[in-house]
Amino acid sequence: MLKLSSLDPVALKCKALAIPVAEDKSLHQNRIISSTIKHIKGYKEFTGKESETMTVYDPKRLNAKRIFLFGVGKAAEIDTEKLRTMAGKSIKKAIAFDLTEVVILIPSAKALRLAPEEVISAVGEGARLANHQFDRYKKPKHQVLKQIRLVAEKPFLTKHRTLINQLDAVCGATLLARDWVNTPANDKPPAVFARKVKQAAQNNGLKVEIKDEPWLKKQGFKSMLAVAQGSNNRPRLVVLKYLPKGAKKTIVLVGKGVTFDSGGLNLKPTGAIETMKCDMSGAAAVAAALVAAPKRKVKHNLIGVLPLVENMPSGKAFRPGDIIKTWAGKTVEIGNTDAEGRLILIDAIAWAVDSFSPDITIDMATLTGACVVALGEKIAGVFSPDDKLADNLVKAGRETHERCWQLPLPEDYKELLKSEIADTGSIGGGRWGGAITAALFLSEFVKDIRWAHIDIAGPAFLKKGGPYGEAGASGFGVRLIHRWLDTL
Ligand code: BES
Ligand code: ZN
Ligand code: ZN
């Protein structure tokens, strides 16, 4: 779907050519392209300011039927996110005009303060991610494009083609995660979601095991089973393995997979419950990241662990005040049945660490509303006792624009989790610092390993669409994890 070629953009016959235009400088080496832009700018109706757009039909001297000009602001201020945005807008415009393909002209890296690889990846990502609609339940008004061509003026090296294939794999996986999360809870109870994941994983050459409830009982996943017990839809644990030859490191990725979080007996109120099909976004991101691993030829062993449950109130549901056991043997007094994510994670993490002895463990979870209060809807919270690991995740977040911010794990806050009658309480009690106390609770079960927790409650599911994504599931975490894996 995504093709990179180095062609003469003037001779190129196409229905639509999208061109990024800066305010103060030409971004293209081709003289005819530059003089066409200069000519249009002469009318003063389009100046290249950020978010300005203009369509010109039958431009003189070009073979394109129409050109879409996209203002990207001052050349020195153009970053990869502005390029993703420009590419995403090109695709959305072409879709709205019922075109079947679009050609995007890649700006010259020399004119920007970016490496050619960064320019190509950013344009490719924005375009690929924008060319998607969740159409399982309603016929969309417009169809997505059949083809996107990225055209660069200079001859491109083979390594740039590889780059396109790689980002195609990661973006494809991101879109898969979006589709899983957007699927309503009635169509993805744990057993069904597990099967969907298995299919995608097997198609991509991963090893997959689905563990059912008798297995979970036998193994002693007591804390996870306590959350699951209120629902008629029985839990599953999915284990995905990518084990390339010669791998030196093993990374365990755990994803919270609550296919619907009603809150349980502490039922969520109207206004908070409606979007809770998104509570398996961590599991979706982990599964999708593994699905992309073979195509991206990731060098490390990856183990994905997905605890899948539905959190429902019923006559069988667990209660506030219940004391439950965990896989690791500690007892937990339940403070609130809506704090269920941490209970499935501690069993999955402790079991995975014991089973696979990973070098690094990362969990991703839509864990707390408090994290959304702290960082808003677009930034995830990163918690780790290992500052270097946290820094690397934050850096990967900056580069992918899946932004993360490190939050602390203060020892003295552990006091808030204390229970009089069990080894620990499940929640912090008071109103404040809920994202931190949740992370501290997890930390009590992952002692002495390199571990990071990413709270994606904000960015996993968006009220408003962006330039390269629709409202709803964002697929947050897939690109982040892959970028981070590249730094290991
Ligand atoms: N799934 C929610 C967190 C969430 C909130 C995800 C908003 C996405 C958007 C989680 O299980 C939850 O309900 N957490 C509670 C914990 C509290 C009861 C200690 C919360 O954050 O309110
Ligand atoms: Zn909850
Ligand atoms: Zn939840």
Image (tube, rainbow, N blue to C red):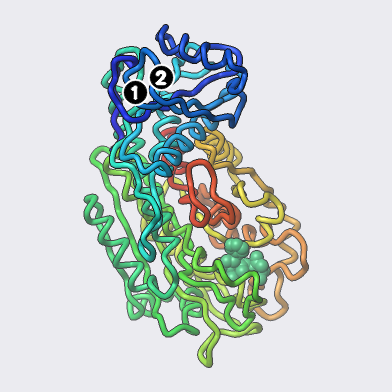
Q: Is residue 220 left or right of residue 443?
A: left
Which amino acid type is marked by label 1?
Ala
Q: Which residue is mark 2?
A: 59
Ligand 2 shown in quarter: bottom right
Is 78 above or below relative to 125?
above
Q: Nearer the viewer, residue 160 or 429?
A: 160
> Which marked residue is nearer to the observer: mark 2 or mark 1?
2
Disc 2, SS: loop
Which amino acid type is marked by label 2?
Pro
Q: Which residue is mark 1?
A: 64
Q: Image quarter for residue 170?
A: top left
Residue 224 visible in the snapshot? yes
Residue 424 visible in the snapshot? no
Graded by Cα atoms within 10 Å as few (under 14), some (14 to 19) or many (20 or more), the crowding at tag 1 reads: many
- At 53% from the left edge and 86% from the top edge, which residue is drawn? 317
Q: Position of residue 237 (x, y in %)?
A: 37, 68
Query: Where does the C terminus fall, quadrant-wise?
Result: top left
Q: Nearer the viewer, residue 207 or 276?
A: 276
Q: Position of residue 216 (x, y in %)?
A: 38, 75
Contact check, label 2 and label 1, Cβ < 8 Å: yes
